[in-house]
Image (tube, helix red, strand yellow):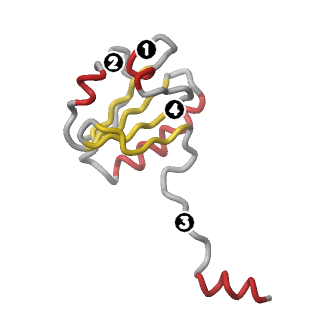
Amino acid sequence: MAPAEDYAEKEPSRPEVDELRGATLLEFGNLWCGYCYRAQLLVSEALESHPSVRHLKISDASGRRLGRSFRVKLWPTLVFLKNGREISRLVRPTVLAPPRRTGSRQQRNQSKNT
């Protein structure tokens, strides 16, 4: 599936989200949010390598029920679901890849001995 372009003003209900099958990324944010804007390239690149992931961009605000049901406090908040259940989340991501160790174990051990 292609990444969603704009944040949807009409949000699905929480029961509808809970019934989603497969992998889903819920992205809570807003068009005018600078953090959200900066995260778009990261999100798009990550989704390109995972085309089967459903991507729902939800326009969030203090009175929006879906964001509150996921306890969203900062934007963007990325909630990863599998079969309607939250398995992970990222808040204000600057990188989407897991951190990698720098250097091999041998190099780290050598630097300790010097």
Q: Which residue type does callout 4 highlight?
A: Pro
Q: Which residue is mark 1?
A: 64
What residue sits right under mark 3 in the picture?
Answer: 100
**Do the residues under discs 4 and 1 have CB atoms within 8 angstroms?**
no
Q: Quadrant of residue 7?
A: top left
- Badge 1 density bin: few <14, some 14–19, many ≥20, Cα 10 Å: some
- Report the residue marked by disc 2: 11
Q: Residue at x 65, y 84 (%)?
A: 107
Residue 103, above or below 51:
below
**Lower sequence index among marks 3 and 1:** 1
Q: Classify mark 2: residues with Cα within 10 Å, few (<14), some (14-19) or many (20+).
A: some
Q: Residue at x 57, y 25 (%)?
A: 33
Badge 3: few (under 14), some or many (20 or more) residues near its Cα, within 10 Å? Answer: few
Q: CA distance from mark 3 to mark 1?
A: 36 Å
Question: Which of disc 1 and disc 4 is earlier in sequence?
Answer: 1
Q: Position of residue 74 (x, y in %)?
A: 56, 28
Determine the residue positioned at 34% across, 38% down: 3
> Could you tell me the amino acid type at mark 2?
Glu
10 Å crowding of disc 4: few (<14), some (14-19), many (20+): many
* Disc 2 secondary structure class: loop
Q: Which residue of the protein is positioned furthest toward the top in this rendering?
A: 63
In the rendered image, which residue does mark 4 sit on?
A: 76
Left or right: residue 72 versus residue 20 is right
**Rendered location of residue 114, percent (x, y):** 80, 88
Instruction: Tell me the distance, in whole angstroms, between the alpha carbons under discs 1 and 2.
Output: 8 Å
Could you give the CA–CA distance between mark 4 and mark 3, rounded to whole angstroms?
23 Å
- Of labels 3 and 2, earlier in sequence is 2
